[in-house]
Image (cartoon, grey):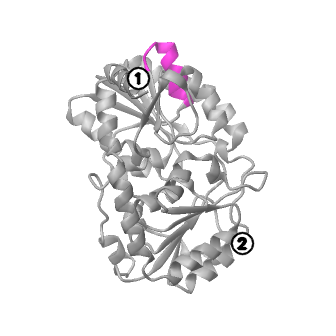
């Protein structure tokens, strides 16, 4: 089978990494198309993957609108030459459009309910939409639900274990306490109208009372924050996150990653009405309400209060590890499931429909 995969974000590299390797090992031919966004190309290189970059990531709605047809056309030309049997991505409008032109099926993985613009651009052209079982939107018979989260494609213990050498690089040990703070760029289409931390300096000052603070940021920061910025290879970030005493930030994906690694996780993000955006995410609601692994707040003040409560309890990390074990007992190795689903498509889709109908 010839499979065309679009990688549009650093998180997508992690999501598809194991599945790409497994499908390649099984003799399938994989072609990756991507764009130059943050650490995406570095992660692809570190993973040993060949790829075709079709240009630079375009921030803002105007930039994305201008780039849409151009990226569609570039991927179309690549697809005409590659002649894929199937196209796969995590919510890519480009592959969705190209799939219809070349008349090949497109499988889209998705876990963000409120990315309305991308869903409108993608959903009408998508053959099969794979989502977590807790996903709040319904796409009818095209939707396949699985018992997991996209982050379990690369953080499930079957495929990942933290590397303690990252602590040595930073002059730390497993006994040291530290927090990771995340700032995002707010440049994604689903970030329009949202807001995060109002006073980053207060967050850092508060967390410093409990240990070292590291910053991971998509956007440029003021000079006074430079000394906190992480300087480690991007492929080692998840290992560091697993050892952290606390994660707090604006990045939804990293909040979920922290929780699934057994690290107390706090998300700060509000919509235009001042409401916590986590309420519109099935993943966030399930991880908070069923497993107690994360919190989300619309404002910094409430988030910092929770952070202090967690850090004041020196047993919090052990408590979170126990919660994580309970979650893992309920969830699957998502990358292994993806490999089987893609390799056996469309029969895998028909099998899912039969299984779903029996359960009704």
1 or 2: tag closer to the N-terminus: 2
Give 132 or 115, whichever is nearer the viewer. Answer: 132
Q: Percent from the top left, x then y, of residue 250?
A: 61, 60
Q: Residue furthest left?
A: 26
Q: Residues within 10 Å of mark 2 (few under 14, many from 20)?
A: few
What kind of element bears circle 1?
helix
Horizontal side of 76 relative to 153 (left or right) equals right
Q: Look at the image and tell me in which quarter the N terminus lies.
A: top left
Q: Percent from the top left, x then y, of residue 2?
A: 32, 23
Asked if one can make out residue 240 in the rendered structure from this viewpoint, the answer is: no
Toward which corner of the image does residue 334 lie, by quadrant? top left
Task: Write the residue at 53% across / 76% down.
Answer: 310
Q: Which mark is residue 357?
A: 1
96 in magenta: yes
Give 288 or 338, whichever is nearer the viewer. Answer: 288
Question: Height in image: 150 above or below 228?
Answer: above
Q: Which residue is mark 2?
A: 199
Q: Which residues are magenta?
A: 93-105
């Amino acid at each position: 089978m010839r499979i065309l995969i679009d990688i549009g974000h650093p998180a997508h590299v992690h999501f598809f990494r194991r599945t790409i390797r497994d499908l390649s090992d099984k003799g399938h031919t994989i072609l990756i198309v991507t764009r130059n966004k943050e650490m995406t190309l570095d992660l692809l290189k570190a993973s040993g993957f060949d790829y075709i970059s079709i240009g630079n990531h375009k921030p803002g709605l105007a930039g994305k609108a201008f780039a849409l047809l151009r990226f569609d056309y570039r991927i179309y030309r690549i697809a005409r030459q590659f002649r894929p049997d199937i196209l796969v991505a995590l919510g890519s409008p480009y592959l969705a459009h190209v799939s219809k032109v070349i008349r090949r099926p497109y499988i889209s993985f998705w876990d963000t309910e409120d990315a309305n613009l991308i869903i409108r651009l993608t959903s009408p052209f998508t053959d099969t939409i794979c989502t977590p079982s807790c996903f709040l939107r319904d796409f009818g018979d095209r939707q396949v639900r699985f018992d997991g989260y996209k982050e379990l494609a690369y953080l499930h213990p079957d495929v990942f274990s933290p590397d303690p050498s990252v602590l040595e690089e930073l002059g730390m040990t497993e006994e040291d306490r530290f927090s990771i703070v995340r700032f995002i760029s707010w440049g994604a289409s689903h970030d329009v109208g949202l807001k995060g931390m109002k006073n980053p300096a207060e967050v850092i000052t508060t967390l410093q009372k409990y240990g070292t603070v590291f910053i991971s940021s998509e956007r440029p920061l003021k000079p006074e924050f430079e000394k906190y910025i992480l300087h480690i290879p991007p492929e080692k970030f998840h290992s560091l996150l697993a050892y952290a005493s606390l994660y707090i930030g604006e990045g939804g994906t990293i909040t979920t990653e922290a929780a699934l690694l057994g690290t107390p996780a706090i998300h700060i993000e509000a919509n235009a009405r001042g409401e916590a955006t986590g309420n519109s995410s099935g993943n966030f609601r399930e991880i908070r309400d069923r497993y107690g692994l994360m919190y989300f707040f619309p404002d910094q003040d409430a988030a910092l209060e929770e952070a202090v409560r967690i850090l004041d309890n020196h047993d919090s990390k052990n408590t979170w590890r126990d919660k994580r074990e309970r979650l893992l007992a309920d969830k699957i190795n998502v990358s292994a499931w993806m490999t089987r689903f893609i390799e056996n498509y469309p029969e895998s889709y028909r099998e899912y429909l039969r299984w779903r109908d029996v359960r009704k």
